[in-house]
Amino acid sequence: MSEKVFLAGATGAVGAALVPLLIEAGYTVHGSTRRADRAGVLEAQGVHPVVVDVFDAAELRAALVRIAPWGVIHQLTDLPKDLDPGRMATAAVLNARVRTEGTRNLVAAAQASGAKRLVAQSIAWAYAPGPKPFTEEQPLDTEAEGVRRISVDGVVALEKCVMAAQGMTATVLRYGQLYGPNTSTDTPKGPSPLHVAAAARAALLALQRSTGGIFNIAEDGAEVSTEKAKRTLGWRADARLSQGAMP
């Protein structure tokens, strides 16, 4: 396999776990970071670093057109270290901007580059009140208020933009609350926990197997159903170890 993949957010928690999986599967990985001082870290991992800000639409488009990736993976977030409660209200606004403006720029650049596959990170705790476990067909909580409304509006914008992408197979992964290396906690938390390695595995499987659509990605529990991901992608929450390229 020699396809090129552009990984937006390659130094984030999921990105860092995903890089070795992509390389082991045989992809040539071009990973983005906003900070030039992180380029060396990516190079040491076997990644071609791309220093670019997702809010600079022209530079982002130029980078992707130059790379001409087969697949684009969106793992961008803008969250404070350890999810500092004192900074989360501000972070909700910043993260929503990534999901709206950043996603719009990334999808436009992916389309301009001729990419054939698009996988994007969303969240599994934006559902409107209703029967549980939540399935992908149930509505999101667009009537929420305050900080939650800001987050949900960002999620809605991201998912609409990704699913409307032209010329490529588009997939949205609604992740549960992440735990594990490079996250805010080493132990499961929240109603729909998800180990970061399992999140990365889901992104690889979506890149390789998805025919498009939205998938809940979380550990089994009463909050969300992951039957669709198990059935369609062959994903399991306990499959954290690298197993090479998927057929």
Image (cartoon, rainbow, N blue to C red):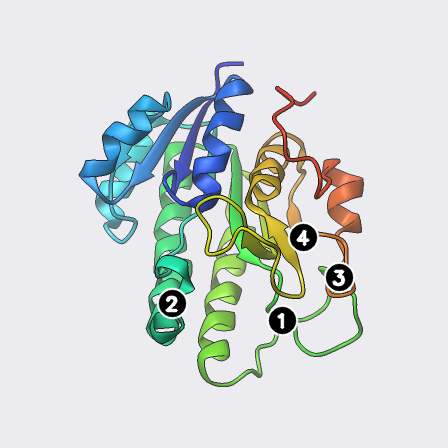
* Residue that badge 3 annotates: 135
Task: Give the quadrant of residue 50.
Answer: top left
Say left or right for 237 vs 150: right
Image: 178 above or below 11:
below
Q: CA distance from mark 3 to mark 1?
A: 11 Å
Q: Earlier in the sequence, mark 4 or mark 3?
A: 3
Q: Which three-letter amino acid code belongs to the residue tagged 2?
A: Asp
Marks 3,1: beta carbons within 8 A: no
Foreground mark, 2 or 1, reads 2
Image: 39 above or below 87:
above
Q: Nearer the viewer, residue 180 or 58?
A: 180
Q: Secondary structure at mark 2?
A: loop
Residue 218: give its label: 4
Q: Is residue 145 visible?
A: yes
Residue 22: give its label: none
Question: How many C-alpha atoms fall within 10 Å of the one at disc 2: few (<14), some, or many (≥20)?
Answer: few
* Residue that badge 1 annotates: 140
Say left or right for 115 vs 196: left
Q: Is residue 164 visible?
A: no
* Residue that badge 2 annotates: 84
Q: Secondary structure at mark 1?
A: loop
Q: Earlier in the sequence, mark 3 or mark 2?
A: 2
Question: How many C-alpha atoms fall within 10 Å of the one at disc 1: few (<14), some, or many (≥20)?
Answer: some
